[in-house]
Amino acid sequence: MQLLDPYIYDSQFLFLKMDEHLADEYKKTILSDISCIYIPEINSYIRKENWDSNKFSIDIARILWIENKIDDDIYKEIINNTAAHKCTYVRLNKEHTFCKYAQKNDLKLLSTKVSQHLDLRNVNFDYDKSFSYHLYLDTMDLRNEIINQVLDLSKDSFNYNRFKSDPFFTNSQIMEIYRDWIINEVKSKSCSLYYLIENKEVAAFFLYKSNISPINSVKIGFVSLIASSNKFKKKKYASNLLNYVLSKMRLDTCFVIANTEIQNNSALSFFSKNNFLITSYLNEYHIWN
């Protein structure tokens, strides 16, 4: 079996370590994206991004692939190749040698995400069947009211992100980025929005992406965002909603991933209590030019 370099790609998929084709399949996923550019001199892939905000204009890119090298000259060349963009986002396993290079050369670590996974095939999902679970549809009469309540419930989650650690962004811009992201994910149908109602209020919601897998034979769901109202915390609406949705997905989904900032202790505790296992730790950087 081919041994994989566990730091060469976005290591949220490391729980698939027994699949010897993972690296090749991940490369195919990258190459299928027409906005990706391959830089042969440094064997890296860069993609243009927009971070879901229409109100400020900066040229943004993301490095999707960096080989795990010891040679600092390679990393200097990677930094040089980001000069065409105002800002370049990098997310890598914290054990990747690029992270050591970044620390040594004062490239600020903005955030570390804990990547967690759940094997749906090994879990018996338990949820309160007396609750009324809903799926958001863009034909609903109250669709705007539901979205507005979801945005209000999302505010606390905005406190834990890489943008908060980057002095380039103001608080209002951070709120704008995340609000636009949620609205775009729902309206573009990139994610499904599930929610619970109590007394005409959204008590909890779950933004779920059905498949982010780089491998055709393995379907992997993704927890984009989950939150509940402080008024209803004791009723465990978020856990019940999570288990309700994942119980429906288990028929054709093998795994689910959730990525949480390492400072967000309540979220880490939530996923741990719901049987998620830690896969890896992902360091995040912005390279500004």
Image: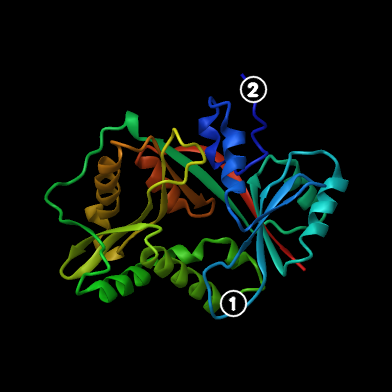
| The C terminus, quarter of image | bottom right
Q: Quadrant of residue 8?
A: top right
- 137 sits to left or right of 36: left
Secondary element type, mark 2: loop
Q: Which residue is mark 2?
A: 2
Q: Position of residue 163 (x, y in %)?
A: 59, 66
- In this picture, is 253 found above or below 171? above
Q: Position of residue 55 (x, y in %)?
A: 55, 81
- 59 sits to left or right of 223: right
Q: Position of residue 1 (x, y in %)?
A: 61, 18
Q: Could you tell me which residue is drawn at 79 percent across and 39 percent down?
A: 69
The residue lying furthest to the left in this view is 130
Disc count in the image? 2
- 76 sits to left or right of 127: right
Q: Nearer the viewer, residue 154 or 121?
A: 121
Q: Position of residue 26 (x, y in %)?
A: 58, 40
Q: Is residue 155 visible?
A: no
Give the number of the disc on residue 142: none
- In this picture, is 144 found above or below 93? below
Q: Could you tell me which residue is drawn at 58 percent across and 26 percent down?
A: 20
- In this picture, is 53 found above or below 47? below
Categorize mark 2 by other alpha carbons within 10 Å: few (<14), some (14-19), many (20+). few
Q: Which amino acid is tagged 1? A: Thr
Q: Is residue 32 visible?
A: yes
Q: Give the mark nearer the N terminus: 2 vs 1.
A: 2
Q: Which residue is mark 1?
A: 170
The residue lying furthest to the top in this view is 1
Q: Which amino acid is tagged 2? A: Gln
Nearer mark to the viewer, of 2 and 1: 2
- 256 sits to left or right of 102: left
